[in-house]
Structure formats: C-alpha cells, structure tokens
Image: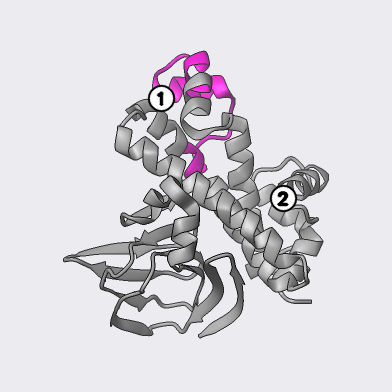
Amino acid sequence: MQDRASIVEGFTIREGRHAAGSSLAWHTHAGPTLCFVYAGSFTESFKGATLECTPGTLKITPAGEPHSDRFGREETHGLLVEADASGVERLGRYAAVLEDRASFQDGALTGLAWRIRGELRQGDTAAPLAIEGLLLELLARAARERELRLTGVVPRWLAAARECLHEQAHTGSLSELAEAVGVHPVTLARGFRKAYGCSVGAYLRWLRVARAARDLAETDAPLAEIALSVGFADQSHFSNVFRRATGLSPSAFRRAMRGV
C-alpha cells in the first residue's frame, strides 16, 4: 500500500505501508532502489541469503536483482526510492553506490530519511526541490560509507565506538568512550571525523534527533518526555537542536508527519 510520492530528476520517491504479516513474492525492479524503514520490520530474501530490515535500516538493491519480502507482526512504514536510467546517469561516478547490495544503520542517514518523509507530507511547491537536495545528500552519505567499507580503513576500535553510540551504551564524555574502546581521546576524535565526516558529538546529536523524529511521528508522547528519553538535558535544548537539524520545530515536524 503506497501513500505520498514525488518525482525529481530521475528518481521516484514513495512513502509506503505494508500490512502486518503480509508478503511480496519474488520480484525485480528495472532500476536500482533504496528502501528506508521508518517503523515495523521485514525480512528480505535474495540469492540464498536474507536481510533483516528494522527501523533505521537503509538498504540498496541493484537493478534487476530478484528478491522477496515478508513483513513482521506490525504494519511496516517505509520510504522507497527508485532510480531510472537518467537518475543513474546524472550521478556519474557516484552511481557506484547503487551497483551493489548494501545496508546501513547510520544516524545521519536516518535523519535525512525522516526529513524526506516530512517534505513528502508538506507537499507544497518547494517540496520537490527540498526532496531532491535531501536525496542527493543521503546518496553522498551512503557513498562515503560504501567507500569506507571497500577500502577497509575503519579500524575495529572506531567501529566499536560508533556501535556504542548506536546502542545508547555511551552517555559519558569523549574520554570515557575512548577508554571503552582502548584508544586516546585525540585518536578517537581525529579518527571519527576522518572516517564519518563529523565529530563524535555531532554524530550523537544526529542519532538523538533521528530517534526523536521517530517518536514524534509514531507516538503521542509529550515533547519533554521525548527529549529526556533520547538524551537531551531538557525540552528547550532538544527543540533548538531539532530545529537546526531538520528545519522544523518538534511540534511542526509532528504536524507535518501526520499531514495536519
């Protein structure tokens, strides 16, 4: 079941839903696709393997690759981006990110995907331009992540540090995070920025904004409660950071997500 859609310069972007327990038989797409999971989950089968797609997962499927999907116990909400030949050509050498199957769990990618959803729901005359910019930024971020994986330049301690941030296992200082993964804080700070293009603090803020965006869209929890649950000191701090990251206040974002 599909909701809102937009077509921008060689890409079709759709917000879709699938009923709990439903499935999609084996199928292919003429062009490469990106799929982001907002809520719910599904298992994708392909080439004798499976991929578990949970909230926050961004997956890339190459053109023409057969796959099937089985959805979980809750209704699944997602974003599907389909690229046609002109869209792939427009990316030039950066189109390589669409040539191989890949999946990501990344705070910045999650924030961008939620912002795309917000623009789809805004639906005004400026939305296509905003969606195009966000989509290109998302592809650039995924391309950087792909390059890191291919070159193998991410040391184990750096991957462990990012995993701590994703698991909400770290709420202390940079020094404490560095100690947890066994390196000097300066080494962690420099290595993280080089690998992921931002500071540890900025990445953690992206994760918190992404989690808050999910809660704003999917729950009726008060803003103060969401702020504390995702790690902000208070509602005012949360609102300021959220507005800088998404361009909307938390209340306006919630209204946009619900088409109010």
Q: Residue at 55% x, 74% y: name it.
A: 14
- Is residue 11 placed above or below 148 in the rendered structure? below
Please state if 25 lies on the left or on the right of 203 as rendered.
Answer: left
Q: Residue at 51% x, 20% y: name it.
A: 190
Please state if 247 lies on the left or on the right of 25 as rendered.
Answer: right
Residue 106 is at least partly visible in this image: no
**Residue 131 counted in the magenta span:** no
Query: What residue is pinned by disc 2?
Result: 227
Residue 49: % across, % down: 20, 63
Q: Which residue is farthest left?
A: 48
Residue 29: % across, % down: 36, 74
- Is residue 172 placed above or below 222 in the rendered structure? above
* Residue 181 - label: 1
Residue 179 occupies quadrant: top left
Please state if 38 lies on the left or on the right of 105 as rendered.
Answer: right
Q: Which quarter of the figure is the C terminus placed in?
A: bottom right
- What span is in magenta? 164-189
In the rendered structure, which amino acid carries the disc numbered 2? Ala
Question: In terms of sequence position, does the residue under pointer 2 or pointer 1 come before the other?
Answer: 1
Label total for image: 2
Name the dominant secondary structure of the magenta segment: helix
Circle 1 SS class: helix
Viewer-proximal residue among 4 and 62: 62
* Residue 81 - label: none
Residue 37 is at least partly visible in this image: yes
Q: CA distance from mark 2 to mark 1?
A: 28 Å
